[in-house]
Image: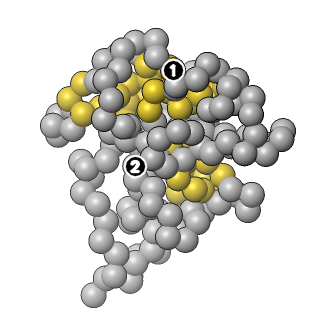
Amino acid sequence: MGTLNPGQMFDHNLDVVKGPSLMHRLDFHAAPVAGEAINEGSLMSLNDEGKFIAGCPVGAVAIHAMPIFAIQGINDFDANSDIGNTSGGVMSGVVATGGFEIATTEFDADDYEPGQLLTGSSVTAGLVGKATVLPYGLENVVGCVSRNREINADGKSMLSFWTMFLPCGATA
């Protein structure tokens, strides 16, 4: 009997709305930190060991966490092994360097309007939310809202935005 309880594929979602095709988009793969809670569509970044962590924390001087959006969740069978499963415990994510419009279920429950900047620095790890300070301040900016929230075919609220990275000017 297996030991892994994967989430339902409609609970958490990441949709690359526009941008390069699957074969040409900029993505990155790495192992997650053990015990980290990362869902599909979550904001994540690399720690100093090169492993995925939830969120995009403010770093030390001249070190900035690059925002990456999870293509699969940590407990999905293509990212984590279970009895009889041969996956390698590696996750993938879309790197938020720009050139993408994505939609995700992983955002805080605020209201949004086009043009608002998004951060992962001041909200629950793994979620995006409204930036509350100007760029280059105390928060890493990871996106710019492209549309108001929408409901997907599974009845889940999705937030669409263009990925971008404006690192904060402060340090941890």
Is residue 115 placed above or below 155 in the rendered structure?
above
Q: Amino acid at mark 2?
A: Glu
| Mark 1 neighbour density, 10 Å: few (under 14) some (14–19) many (20 or more) | many
Q: Is residue 153 left or right of residue 72?
A: left
| Mark 2 neighbour density, 10 Å: few (under 14) some (14–19) many (20 or more) | many
Q: Would residue 97 be visible to someone looking at this image? A: no
Which residue occupies 47% across, 41% down? Answer: 123
Q: Is residue 62 left or right of residue 153?
A: right
Q: Measured from the top left, where is residue 35 in percent x and y?
A: 49, 70
Q: Check disc 1 and report its element: helix, strand or loop.
A: strand
Q: Which mark is residue 153?
A: none
- Residue 83 appears in which quarter of the rendering? bottom left
Q: Measured from the top left, where is residue 138 in percent x and y?
A: 65, 32
Q: Would residue 114 be visible to someone looking at this image? A: yes
Which residue occupies 46% across, 12% down? Answer: 115
Q: Mark 1 or 2, which is nearer the eye?
A: 1
Location of mark 2 (residue):
40
Between the residue at mark 1 and the residue at mark 2, the CA separation in whole angstroms equals 21 Å
Location of mark 1 (residue):
117
Which residue occupies 33% across, 43% down? Answer: 13
Q: Measured from the top left, where is residue 140 in percent x and y?
A: 63, 32
Q: Measured from the top left, where is residue 157 in percent x and y?
A: 24, 33
Is residue 144 placed above or below 75 in the rendered structure?
above
Q: Amino acid at mark 1?
A: Leu
